[in-house]
Image: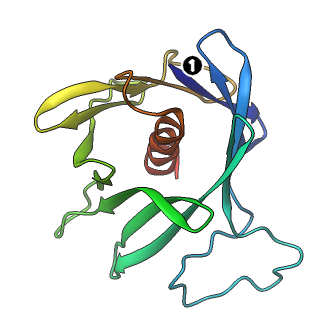
Amino acid sequence: MLIAQQRSALSGFTYDLAAADGTVIGELCFPDWAQARNARLKNPAPGLLRSSIDLRLSGTAYRIEFEYTRRGWTNDIRFELMLDGERLASADAVVPKGGFRRATLRITEPFRGELVRRSGFFKTRFELQRGGQALGLVHEPDAFTTRRRLCAELAPDIRPELQAFLLFLVINLAYG
């Protein structure tokens, strides 16, 4: 199990990543100015504003990059987990056309799957499915907190960096 907890109740930009016993093993840092690879509007102050999504886990630094795959009233977005220029994982947030509906999160690498929303009234809950089979949950354990907290309870064959990537996807879709 991997846990993502908002570091400060006043800022949702940094999350501590912890093991099941509560030991902090990394962090997920959202940027001041998120910039897609194919962005029309570029970071106006690259020296002052961070524009990368950084993931540090067990001493290894990863980046999460994104690009728009379809633009319109709503945008489809591809997210990629990168390590030294190599793509480790990829997922697409696809918004159904017509009306105001939530995006679907489709995992495309390292396996084909989907994060399916199974939210309750006050809690965020997504089920990871591959081929119709449930591989685990990414969920909020508590309904009311001062700092957001999500737990990834996934199959043991899913590597920790991929679990952190899935936590990022849920945070981005549910709270973004």
From the viewer's side, name the closer residue of 36 and 135.
135
The residue drawn where x is 23% and y is 45% is 113
The secondary element bearing badge 1 is classed as loop
- In the rendered structure, which amino acid carries the disc numbered 1? Phe
Q: Quadrant of residue 7?
A: top right
| Depicted 9 relative to depicted 174: above or below | above
The percent position of residue 81, horizontal first and vertical second, equals 51, 56
The percent position of residue 172, horizontal first and vertical second, equals 50, 50
The residue drawn where x is 33% and y is 54% is 109
| Depicted 89 relative to depicted 120: above or below | below
The residue drawn where x is 22% and y is 35% is 129
* Residue denoted by label 1: 144
The residue drawn where x is 59% and y is 13% is 20
Q: Quadrant of residue 98?
A: bottom left
Q: Is residue 145 left or right of residue 96?
A: right
The percent position of residue 14, horizontal first and vertical second, equals 73, 43
Q: Is residue 148 left or right of residue 87?
A: right
Q: Quadrant of residue 15?
A: top right
